[in-house]
Image: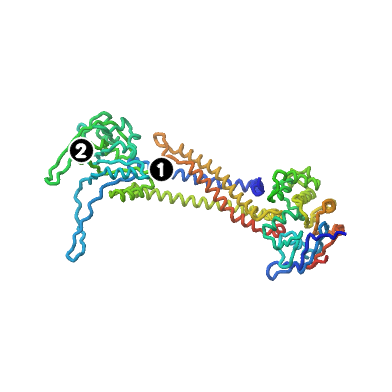
């Protein structure tokens, strides 16, 4: 039997916000395997988003160690960190956070354009392929404000997937959608996990969706209960 | 298209109203700078041309006699105050060597020897005191008399002479008329007076733009003047035209050092004019400074608003891998593009204003009051200034954008 490799290992992670302010995370130990489909759950203010920001390398812990894909990510320079984030991680947010001045396909192209070394000629093709993956290729040239909430979230997923990440971080991806759209988005995440082996970490308040994940990581008062 | 340019262009397009407003401000600023500079440059060029139209850039004369000192009994020096008697022109006898040195100087365009002195001009029953100036052909390169002839030709050979329009009017002269010039010189020993006279044919009449010059000057050849002024083979001044008019003072100092003669530049001779020109320059720089500051503040404030409005988008871009450098460059490019586009508009506006002014402000003869000098250098310089201002003005907003904490920006926008 082949043992699953961890994509993420966090040890003794502490996160304080400024001097004398509340401790958001306190001694977190967390290991996530490659190909996992896990929900991060917990009450509001428990530290879920802080944990996701640390995993997404958008923030740094006050203390502790973090290994991602075998790399000591806390030892990376800001430039290496940016490149790592761009090449290995994908983000989906509760409010799609698409750039409203750009079309759907342009939003998907932006991460590709930002990454040095990508072939410029193939960017639109790659972006269209990614939009097809989420069923949005027919609206590729539509302006973002003209898309429905569900469509916008699909485009946001395509943007997150454009650079072929190995870990997808989704912060309440269905929180702003009706049940039908929420189910569709969740199904899409599940399909990407199963078909492409993409590791998915989803922060959610929705216990119904959390129950459909393979693993639930509960954050309570800054502590993680795996 | 690079990522930064793609995003910067889209942001400018997205905020059409803001972009249009700030572009209008930059265009107006650059246009005002160009128009103002063109106006003042034109005015100054006109003033300088008028002033130097009848003046050499450097005048070299023989050193005046030094003051006389009387040693006191106790070794102190007593400066004798002596009323200066009217003096005869100090003649430069060995002027050929000094002239050769002046002509060999790299900053000198032309140099000529002049024999000048007072004379009486008579035509018919009219006579008037004039300044007789004996020149050679090179003089026309110093004061371009031939370009300012109102009639006749610039011919100073043999017994030919050219005179100014005012003198011609006073004496009723036309080309071809005879003019009698008389000089009187005192003999130092006997105090007797020697009078010499020659008759010249008027070959041409000039208008050098100076009433005094037009009324007083009679130009003829050097030899004839030397004979009339009783300074055989001598010259009273060496006159020089330099390549760069504002470098005349330095040239004068060098020529004085190399020849031992006194050398005065037009800048020294026309101190009041130079002071006026410098005051104009100072006024222009003050106005331009405030225009530049206003444009810079305009660009900076618009970009600062954009950065605040786009904080969340900047955070998102950082999250998907845009570097701090890329974020910085997006806003630096925006500022530079605003400066650049404003420069294009400003060049058109400034040139149009200058052209309109040229047509609106006219003399009685239909010519422009003074030339408005819109030069390629001015347009290029103003454009580069606008680009630079745009770039500098965007540094602060760009830094603010680049230093945004992506997690905070995404969460709180």
Where residue B71 sits in the image (x, y, percent)? Answer: 19, 61
Q: Earlier in the sequence, mark 2 or mark 1?
A: 1
In this rendered view, identify the residue nearer to me: B331 or A63: A63
Extreme residue toward the bottom, this view: A20
Q: What residue is rendered at 43% in x and 39% in y? A: B371
Question: Circle 2: is it few (<14), some (14-19), or many (20+) Cα within 10 Å?
Answer: many
Extreme residue toward the front, this view: A1
Same chain for labels 2 and 1? Say yes or no: yes
Give the image quarter of residue B235: top left
Disc number at residue B228?
Answer: 2
Q: What residue is rendered at 43% in x and 49% in y? A: B281
Where residue B31 sits in the image (x, y, percent)? Answer: 52, 44
Left or right position of B56 against B302: left
Question: Chain letter of disc 2?
Answer: B
Q: Which residue is mark 1?
A: B45
Secondary structure beneath label 2:
helix
Task: Classify the position of the N terminus of chain B by image quarter.
Answer: top right
Give the image quarter of residue B73: bottom left
């Amino acid at each position: 039997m082949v043992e699953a490799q961890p994509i993420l290992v966090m040890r003794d992670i502490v996160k304080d916000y400024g001097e004398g302010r509340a401790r958001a995370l306190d001694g977190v130990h967390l290991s996530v395997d490659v190909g996992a489909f896990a929900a991060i759950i917990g009450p509001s203010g428990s530290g879920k988003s802080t944990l996701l920001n640390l995993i997404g390398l958008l923030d740094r812990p006050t203390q502790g160690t973090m290994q991602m894909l075998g790399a000591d990510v806390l030892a990376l320079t800001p430039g290496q960190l940016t490149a790592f984030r761009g090449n290995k991680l994908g983000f989906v947010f509760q409010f799609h956070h698409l750039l409203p001045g750009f079309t759907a396909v342009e939003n998907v192209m932006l991460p590709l354009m930002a990454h040095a070394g990508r072939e410029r000629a193939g960017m639109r093709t790659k972006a269209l392929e990614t939009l097809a993956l989420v069923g949005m290729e027919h609206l590729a040239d539509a302006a973002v404000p003209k898309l429905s909430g569900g469509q916008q979230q699909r485009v946001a997923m395509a943007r997150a997937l454009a650079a072929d990440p190995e870990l997808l971080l989704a912060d309440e991806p269905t929180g702003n959608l009706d049940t039908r759209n929420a189910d569709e988005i969740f199904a899409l995440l599940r399909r990407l996990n199963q078909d492409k082996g993409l590791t998915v970490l989803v922060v959610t308040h929705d216990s119904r969706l959390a129950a459909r994940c393979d693993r639930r990581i509960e954050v309570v008062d800054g502590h993680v209960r795996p | 298209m690079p990522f930064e340019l793609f995003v910067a262009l889209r942001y400018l397009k997205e905020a059409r109203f803001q972009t249009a407003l700030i572009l209008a401000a930059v265009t107006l600023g650059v246009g005002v700078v160009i128009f103002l500079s063109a106006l003042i440059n034109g005015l100054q060029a006109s003033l300088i041309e008028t002033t130097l139209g009848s003046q050499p850039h450097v005048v070299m004369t023989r050193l005046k006699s030094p003051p006389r000192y009387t040693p006191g009994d106790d070794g102190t020096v007593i400066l004798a105050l002596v009323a200066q008697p009217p003096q005869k022109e100090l003649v430069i006898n060995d002027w050929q060597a000094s002239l050769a040195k002046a002509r060999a100087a790299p900053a000198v365009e032309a140099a000529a020897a002049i024999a000048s002195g007072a004379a009486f001009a008579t035509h018919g029953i009219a006579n008037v005191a004039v300044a007789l100036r004996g020149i050679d052909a090179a003089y026309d390169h110093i004061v371009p008399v031939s370009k300012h002839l109102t009639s006749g030709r610039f011919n100073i050979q043999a017994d030919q002479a050219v005179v100014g329009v005012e003198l011609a009017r006073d004496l009723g002269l036309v080309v071809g008329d005879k003019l009698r010039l008389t000089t009187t010189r005192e003999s130092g020993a006997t105090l007797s007076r020697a009078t010499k006279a020659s008759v010249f044919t008027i070959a041409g009449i000039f208008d050098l733009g100076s009433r005094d010059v037009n009324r007083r000057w009679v130009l003829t050849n050097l030899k004839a003047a030397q004979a009339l002024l009783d300074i055989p083979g001598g010259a009273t001044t060496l006159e020089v035209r330099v390549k760069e008019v504002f470098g005349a003072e330095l040239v004068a100092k060098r020529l004085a050092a190399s020849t031992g003669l006194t050398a005065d530049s037009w800048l020294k001779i026309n101190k009041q004019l130079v002071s006026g020109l410098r005051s104009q320059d100072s006024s222009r720089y003050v106005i331009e400074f405030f225009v530049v500051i206003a444009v810079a503040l305009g660009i900076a404030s618009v970009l600062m608003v954009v950065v605040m409005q786009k904080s969340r988008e900047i955070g998102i871009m950082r999250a998907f891998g845009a570097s701090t450098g890329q974020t910085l460059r997006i806003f630096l490019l925006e500022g530079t593009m605003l400066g650049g586009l404003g420069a294009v508009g400003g060049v058109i506006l400034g040139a149009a204003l200058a052209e309109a002014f040229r047509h609106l402000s006219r003399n009685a003869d239909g010519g422009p009051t003074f030339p408005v000098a819109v030069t390629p250098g001015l347009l290029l310089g103003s454009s580069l200034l606008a680009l630079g201002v745009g770039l500098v003005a965007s540094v602060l907003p760009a830094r603010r954008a680049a230093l945004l904490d992506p997690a905070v920006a995404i969460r709180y926008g």
